[in-house]
Structures are given as C-alpha cells and as structure tokens.
Amino acid sequence: MVFTPTAPAQTLTTIQGEPAVPLDAMPASWQRIATGNWMSEPKVYTAMAQVFLAKHQQGNVLFCERPEAAHLKNAYCEGNGQLAYEAVEHYGKAFLPESYPNFNEIRRQVSSSQTPERMALIDTVSELFEELGYDVPATFYWTFLHPLQRDNLFEIRSFRFSEQDLGVARQFDAILHGGYVSMLRRLIDSISSRHGYFIEHGCGCENHLAKLKPCDSPFEYQLPATTRRKTLRAFFWSIMEEYLLFEQRAATKLVYADSVDF
C-alpha cells in the first residue's frame, strides 16, 4: 500500500501526553484489534502503534531538539512516514488471530528428513505460543518455524542475500533483532534449550538452528509476572523500529565470505 504522509497541519490526538494518529486514521486491522479480546492489552498495543506512527510522520523529537536540521524535516517525514506506516500496517495484520500458526497442521506436514529435529523445533515454538500467546505478533512464531522450509534444518543462510528468503527478510529480521529485549531473549533460549536447541542470529542477518553443544545444558527461566507486560510492550516497540529501519541498513556479503581476494 502506498501511503501519503500526514500533512503537518493535520490534527493529531494525544495519548498519555504524546502525539498519536487518531484511531479512525489507522489501518482497519488496528481498529479491529482495539476492540478485540484475544490479546492481553489490545488498547495499549493499539495506542503504541498510533504514537509510533505519529512520531515518525511528524519528525517528533528529532526536529524539536535539532532546529538546525529543520530543512530536512519534510524529506524525513515523507521517507520515515512511509516506512512507519508499512511497519504499523504489517503488525496490524500480524496480530490478527487468523495469522497465527496451526501447529497441528504443521506437524502433519513435517518432512520425512530430520523428522525428530523438525518435531523438536515445532514443539519449541508451540511451547513459546503457550507462554506468550497473542501478545507477540504471528511473525514471531513464523520466524522460528522458518527453518522447516529448508531441506537442511541447520543450513546457515542470509535473509538479505538468499533469493528464497527475500520475501520474508524484513519481517523476520525485525523479530530477530527485536528479540534482544533481554528478558524475552532468556525465555526463548530457556524453552529452546529444553528441546536441545538454541536459535542464533548473527550480524549477517542469517537465521539458523544450532544443536546444543555437549557443554551446554537446559536451563529454566520464566518472565517475571511483575514485568511481563512491560517486557512484551518493549518488544513490540522494538520490532516496529526494526521493521522501519531494515531498508535503511546496509549489508555486505564480505561478513560471511569464505575467502576474500583483492
């Protein structure tokens, strides 16, 4: 969808003292989420999306604190406004209940090769769903299930440079970078370790599973009840930022080149 950035004169609303795009100007998915009951905090997540979009459309903060950059504001708002809208639109769809994996169906479709390992991966992601449910977007689960699409579950492949993965690179890379919210990262590692795996994400934006080494061992970790909601809110804000920033980041094949000849 092509987005026409909000004109500076357009009236915004405020949420908790911060600028926000009015709900009726948000993608239809967010209007549905705001009145839904499948998430723990639908109104909070919707409000965060409204604030996120307003701040990037209007150049909030950056141009208030840097008046010498005022001549760049229109270009910034047009470019970042487009990318921010794409992020908000993407996650609006990703939080709809019909977007989430059907784990029983996925189990029925498991390839005959590496079957125990593939089932362990599905069990890992299924357990993550039991823990986090609809409070993280569907792409969170699809990201970790993605190695099932490969002939070799343990293949190392760059999202940015793999023709097979270009269509999902932006959405999956945002999840992997956003997953470095520390307490959520520990939960992911704890659950995957119980199934004999950990999930790595390297600086070259590749995603692969690695079998636990003999020196490694499973460990237990639970998100503290007192901080669970704030941790997941932080994750949501982080993945919106990462989705926006993906196309602004440069990548190079030199990072993972086996040999370099000059």
Image (cartoon, grey):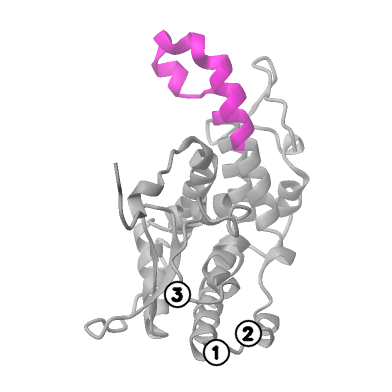
Q: Position of residue 15 (x, y in %)?
A: 58, 35
Residue at horizontal 62%, vertical 63%? 138
* Nearer the observer, 51 or 144: 144
Q: Is residue 82 magenta?
A: yes
**Residue that badge 3 annotates:** 154
Who comes first in sequence, dot 1 or dot 3? 1
Q: Look at the picture and state if 210 lies above or below 139.
A: below
Confirm or deny contact between disc 1 and disc 2 (CB under 8 A): yes
Residue at horizontal 65%, vertical 40%? 86
Q: Position of residue 175 (x, y in %)?
A: 50, 56
Drawn side of residue 23 relative to residue 183, left or right: right
Q: Secondary structure at mark 3?
A: loop
Drawn side of residue 179 relative to residue 213, left or right: right
Amino acid type at circle 3 is Phe
Observer able to see residue 40: no
Who comes first in sequence, dot 1 or dot 2? 2
**Residue that badge 2 annotates:** 110
Drawn side of residue 20 relative to residue 67, left or right: right
Q: Secondary structure at mark 2?
A: loop
Q: Position of residue 139 (x, y in %)?
A: 59, 61
Amino acid type at circle 1 is Thr
Drawn side of residue 102 relative to residue 182, left or right: right
Residue at horizontal 64%, vertical 31%? 82
Who comes first in sequence, dot 2 or dot 3? 2
Q: Start and end of the magenta stretch?
A: 55-84
Q: Look at the picture and state if 204 lies above or below 210.
A: above
**Residue that badge 1 annotates:** 115
In whole angstroms, how far apart are the C-alphas of marks 2 and 3? Answer: 15 Å
Q: Of tags 2 and 3, which is closer to the observer?
A: 3
